Amino acid sequence: MKLKPFFLIASAWVLGSTAGAAPAPADFANQVPLEIAGKGPWYRLQLPIEVLFAARHGDLRDVRIFNAEGEALPYSLRTGAASESRVRSEVQARIFPLRGQSGSAAADSVKVVRSTTGTILEITPSAPAQDPQQVLRGWLLETGSGDLPLDRLQLEWTAEADGFQRLRIEASDDLEHWRSLGEGQLARLDFNGQRIEQNDIALPGETARYLRLWWESPERAAQLSGATLSGSRSSTGPVPMLWSAPLVAKADANGEFSWSLPLALPVERVRIPLAQANTLAPVALSGRHDGNVQWTPLARGVLYRLPGEGGEITQEELELPGASVSQLRLQLDARGGGLGGATANLSIGVRATEVVFLARGGEPYQLAVGSSSAADGSLPLPTLVPGFDAKRLSAMGEAHLKGSLQTQAVETPGAPPKADGRWKRYGLWAVLLAGVGLLGLMALSLLRGSRAQN
């Protein structure tokens, strides 16, 4: 019973030591201050390639943001992805009237003359237009190249009387096979000096080279003076990449080149500049992780620097699957004649990463990186930013490194060693284990004394 208080004290000590293990700037090998601009309290920081090389883990689990009080701020890591945007375009359609005998289909009574590229040159009714039996039944629209997804049709029209104009819409790419795009309605109403107009028709976003408009009541078909088609094209931008400075290769007796990276990184592209013109080199690139003996094939291709019609053409990059590697090896096909130099430089490309953090406390804020023992502390972006969407991301403030990464100062000879937070924790655990050992000895001594008394 006398030992119970000691156990309680030891337990409290363990809990206190664990609670005190929050990350501190001294736990990280490199720190650099940040400057912020724009609207907070959330800020975005694009990480340069130097930060990745200073990290101890390729997934950047050892990156932190601290405030002036040394408190770690909540953050999220966001890997770059291909940007998508939508660009709206308009096309002024060429219009052709479709006439036919009353009660017949206009398509059966017109002659279409097209050029070799498919452009409409002429639409002629089989009977003269002045024939009283010929009536306007609809209109044919030529949309141009036919590669724009059409979602809106705007018509300039006149009619003998106000009211509603209902029509069917069909689409074709060859003027022979037609498909329905639904129905539309135009309207023009005047009363007491007020006017209501409806000149737009929604389309389903399909591509078509030709549109055919059929009026439900041909005797009331509108006269068109113009037609504008519009739609949106999606555009995908390149994946944002970070490129390293050229790394010098080690060459072996077999003519192979190898490079060692500062740490295992998910490399997605490599760039190998060719020093001489008229160079062509079939190559194979392989990689491996720390401690692995076996090389894994990553990419094959042909690097070249050759003359072309508009100037020199080059291919100096290879695309990789993005697996984490710490070493790369380039093997050359001897039939290509080599790279045109005794050595080769290589730059690695990795997908860009940004830190989104919630600013709190005093400035200056600082980025810290480089800790082998750090655990992942990032939050999912929707958790860090409640109600997150792309608009909120674009409206956030921005942060930038204020200077370059600085390694912690090296101790001068004779100066007492400066222990970082990691060694402090090791010391606490050592003292704790020593206390547990002492407790065991005390318990053993009490047990022996009890047996002696018996």
Image (cartoon, grey):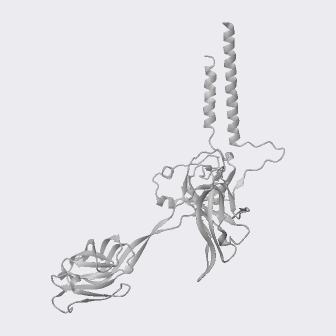
The one of 433 and 408 positioned closer to us in this rendering:
433
- The percent coordinates of residue 280 (x first, y second) are 64, 73
The one of 343 and 385 positioned closer to us in this rendering:
343
The one of 25 and 407 positioned closer to us in this rendering:
407
User: Could you tell me if residue 370 is visible in this image?
Assistant: yes
Residue 414 falls in image quadrant:
top right
Name the residue: 62% across, 41% down.
Answer: 22
Examine the rendered structure and indicate whether residue 29 appears above or below residue 17: below
Examine the rendered structure and indicate whether residue 321 appears above or below residue 423: below
Examine the rendered structure and indicate whether residue 139 appears above or below residue 67: below
- In which quadrant will I find the N terminus? top right
- In which quadrant will I find the C terminus? top right
- The percent coordinates of residue 336 (x first, y second) are 65, 72
Q: Residue furthest right?
A: 414
Name the residue: 67% across, 77% down.
Answer: 277
User: Could you tell me if residue 66 is visible in this image?
Assistant: no
Please give left or right for residue 93 compared with residue 184 in the image: right
- The percent coordinates of residue 144 (x first, y second) are 38, 81
Please give left or right for residue 290 compared with residue 219 in the image: right
Name the residue: 50% across, 52% down.
Answer: 381
- The percent coordinates of residue 304 (x first, y second) are 63, 73
Q: Residue furthest front?
A: 335
Name the residue: 36% across, 88% down.
Answer: 115
Residue 253 falls in image quadrant:
bottom right
* Count of marks placed on residues: 0
